[in-house]
Image (cartoon, rainbow, N blue to C red):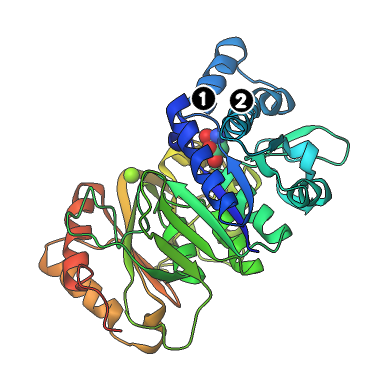
Amino acid sequence: MATIVQKFGGTSVGTPERIQRVAARAVRAHRAGNRVVVVVSAMSGETNRLLSLAGQISQAPHHREIDVLVSSGEQVSIGLVALACCELGVEARSFLGSQVRITTDDAHGMARIRDIDADSVVAALDRGEIVVVAGFQGVNEDGQITTLGRGGSDLSAVAMAAALKADVCEIYTDVDGIYTTDPRVVADARKIDRITFHEMLELASLGAKVLQTRSVEFAMKYEVPLHVRSSFDESEGSWVVPEEEGMEGAVVTGVAFDRNTAKLTVLGVPDVPGTVADLLFPLGEAGINVDVIIQNTAIDGRTDVTFTVSQTEMERAVALAQVVANRLGASGIVADAHVAKVSVVGAGMRSEAGVAVAMFRHLGQANVNIQLISTSEIKISCIIDEKFTELAVRVLHEAFRLHEAPAA
Ligand code: ASP
Ligand code: MG
């Protein structure tokens, strides 16, 4: 008897008919002899609707109340899904995060899961029921409702799968798997059959939207196999799995891009120990993620420090950096919102030299200027002018022949 966690996103539970389809799928898996746990998001658009209601009432709402409010979207979904399963003749029981019980830290709006005590879920499964769990929410040590950050239902599903030692965590979505790049940009983007946790983690954090980054981290840590597949048909999707012997089919597995990138350059910073730390410290304190960082060679004891942040945080980052720049006697700050990050990812890169050079050459031939570069073991990212994003993605997809299935 296998234990299967099935996660359905907002689009998959967006209407009563779709909820009936979700229930039908859960019931099928249950009748096939599996122990089935369904994790659901709020109906599509609902979380945004609730947040905008709060925005009309309060400019600086208390985080605790926001969590009470937005977690209600998932409460609606679990009730409806459980009812739909019952209509199909299988007992089902819904669980809020607090009923499971999913314990988190106190960070309202971006809580981290500390512990899952799944005893009551296990008892329901033992009774032969389908269990329907609210995604995105937990409860802190003293019983306050918390939420896990936008897109957090993926994380709830993976965490439930880890706690139950499930055989698979199926992520049902409106696309039929993970693609070599966004098919809206490259028409012959190909569905990937198997991808490693590491590669998926890079792709997710570099801009691929199909899985929430933290959920991939969690799945990797607890080795929960993920199957990303379509909620609209039965087709096989993409598997995210631990790295296996002989899996290195492709040097490059995918191309990711992120237009939500902005570049800041602090000019004329004194070239003495501690200045970069001084510059970036207040950004870290303010929760702003700094990505690519470059410090140039000093001329006459002064240097330029360039770094990227997400475009949505640019204004805040400039304001914070300006204070330090003034104190250090730097000559100014230049900010550019019109940049994007384009990245190639592949586990096979570790053993294959020359991927970076090939990437730079192809971008050069397409007349795309590279402004900044950063690399890790299995990815290379370039910051470029935002208006060349699609061109760069197409050129790289073609250059690394990602439309072709890798040799087995
Ligand atoms: N409903 C939440 C959101 O919209 C969580 C999720 O959908 O995963 O972010
Ligand atoms: Mg941008």
Contact check, label 1 and label 2, Cβ < 8 Å: yes
Residue type marked 1:
Glu
Asked whether mark 1 lies closer than 8 Å to ligand 1, one says yes
Residue 202 screen position, x and y as percent: 45, 64
**Mark 1 vs mark 2: in front:** 2
Residue 145 screen position, x and y as percent: 76, 32
Badge 2: few (under 14), some or many (20 or more) residues near its Cα, within 10 Å?
Answer: some
Q: Quadrant of the C terminus?
A: bottom left
Q: Residue furthest right?
A: 142
Asked whether mark 2 lies closer than 8 Å to ligand 1, one says no
Earlier residue among tags 1 and 2: 1
Q: Which residue is mark 1?
A: 46
Residue 31 screen position, x and y as percent: 58, 50
Report the number of numbered marks. 2
Mark identifier at residue 17: none
Side of 89 where 177 appears, left or right:
left
Q: Is residue 346 above or below residue 385?
A: below
Comparing 25 with 214, the one in front is 25
Gap in angstroms between the C-alphas marked 1 and 2? 10 Å
Q: Which residue is mark 2?
A: 76
Side of 125 where 264 appears, left or right:
left
Q: Quadrant of the N terminus?
A: bottom right
Would you say residue 204 is visible in this rendering?
A: yes
Q: Give the quadrant of residue 275.
A: bottom right
SS of the residue under disc 1: helix
Q: Residue furthest top?
A: 57
Residue 302 screen position, x and y as percent: 45, 62
Residue type marked 2:
Val
